[in-house]
Amino acid sequence: MGPQVGAPAPPWSRASAKPRVLAKTRVWAKPTALRLTPSLALAAALALPALGLVAPARLGAQALANLPPLPAPLGLSQLQEQVSCPALQQRIAAVVGGEAPVWSVSVVDPGGRLLADLNGRQPRIPASNQKLVSTAFALDRLGPDYRLSTKLWRLSDGSLRLTGEGDPDFGLEQLRRFAKLALGSGGGPGRASGPIRLQLVEEPAQRWWPAGWSAADRAEDYGAPITRLAVTSNAVEMAVANPPNRLKQLLGRELAAQGMQAQISLVTAQARSDPGAVLLHEEPSLSMLGLISEANTHSHNFTAEVLLRQASGSWDLATARAAALQWLQGQGLPMAGVVVADGSGLDRANRLTSRLLAALLLRMAYHPYARDYQASMAVTGQRGTLRKLFKGTELDGRFHGKTGTISGVRTISGILDSSAGPRYVSMISNGASDPNRTIGQILRQVQNANLCPSTP
């Protein structure tokens, strides 16, 4: 996970510039040469509620009420209810054949036309296609400049406190840096030297895994516990069963190597903060593009779970799930039957529809951060979990998407480049016999622009 040693640093690497903003809400840059005319102010005031922001008070409710409404914001229009490309619909039905009951397929064009739809309203287990929801939610709520942060504090009594936000790439190098800083800080100004007192702020154990993750999954590296302070994403070949204990051992070992004893204790993340605490050091994570790429290109469960929690502003999973559902609803997406159980898709209680996923992809195509969202996905024949699929075929490099695989489930949703323009495609199978072959055949039919002539 992360860039390889000696490889060129990607634009989202730790070596890239420090983020301009570290915040939990979107920050919009103020234009330097734009005069806010009354018409622009009105447009902004009417658009802001759709973005979850508040209209300027000086415009006044009465002034807004006396003016005609503006069209719905781009990307928030409803999909057409009726299929508009019978030829493509027939081809897809022929491809799935007798396995139609276990498939959901939806295809949408940039104008919101529902080109084809097979069981598109049927809620199904999405597997890792759930990450498309979590990453869109996080990108929208936190913005492209956001980075997770791990911080070392000196408290009023001279003890130290380490806090984190679940940086998935926090490793031994960063840990050693914090240990050295702890050594250098001593007991604080004017205090006698002695054992370092260090607090680790962490979530209680009952929050480490979503309830629906099986015991077998929790033992694997892909099912590692979700904690705020996670060295190597709480996985060393297999999952680390007790991350705080491991962290205590690693820190204690580093400090002992320098001849210093340490009293390391755990503090719940719900503990009262110290108003007199001083920030000694901060380690930022990868950029948001790097984080959502970990989740979408490489299907990293830990990262997706952290993004869901950070975007919601809460590490209580029930609160985070509710916030994600509310956000989806606010995007004007088809929500019937949708269930958000976790952020990664490992929980089999998740339910999404192919219409929801296709509509989400369309919505994000009109989002201010559309480029980041698409760039975070795997690419057929070239990158991530799609690198081995359709290599050397007409689909090679033409599909940016997200895969999903758990027992009996295969899903692929994304953006297909066709000669008629982009196609937003979601394919979910719960029980298909040879899903990859079917998915390839469906994508080839969607790529055939002659089946669905453009409307004027």
Image: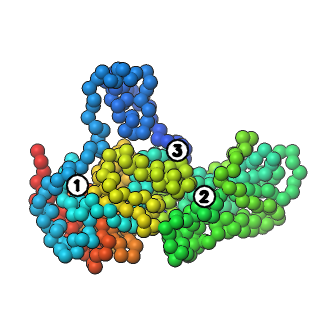
> Amino acid type of disc 1?
Val
Task: Assess disc 2: are there few (<14), some (14-19) or many (≥20) residues with their C-alpha within 10 Å of its C-alpha.
Answer: many
Which of the marked residues, 3 or 1, is nearer the chain's N terminus?
3
Q: Would residue 224 be seen by someone viewing this image from the given angle?
A: yes
x, y percent for residue 391: 28, 72
Q: Is residue 383 left or right of residue 358?
A: right
On the image, numbered disc 1 is attached to which residue? 108
Question: How far separated are the C-alphas under marks 2 and 1?
Answer: 38 Å
Report the label total: 3
Image point 21% across, 60% down: which residue?
117
Image point 78% across, 67% down: which residue?
257
* Front residue of 8 and 356: 356
Q: In this picture, is 350 found above or below 320? A: below
x, y percent for residue 291: 48, 56
Q: Secondary structure at mark 1?
A: strand
Outermost right residue: 192
On the image, numbered disc 3 is attached to which residue? 24
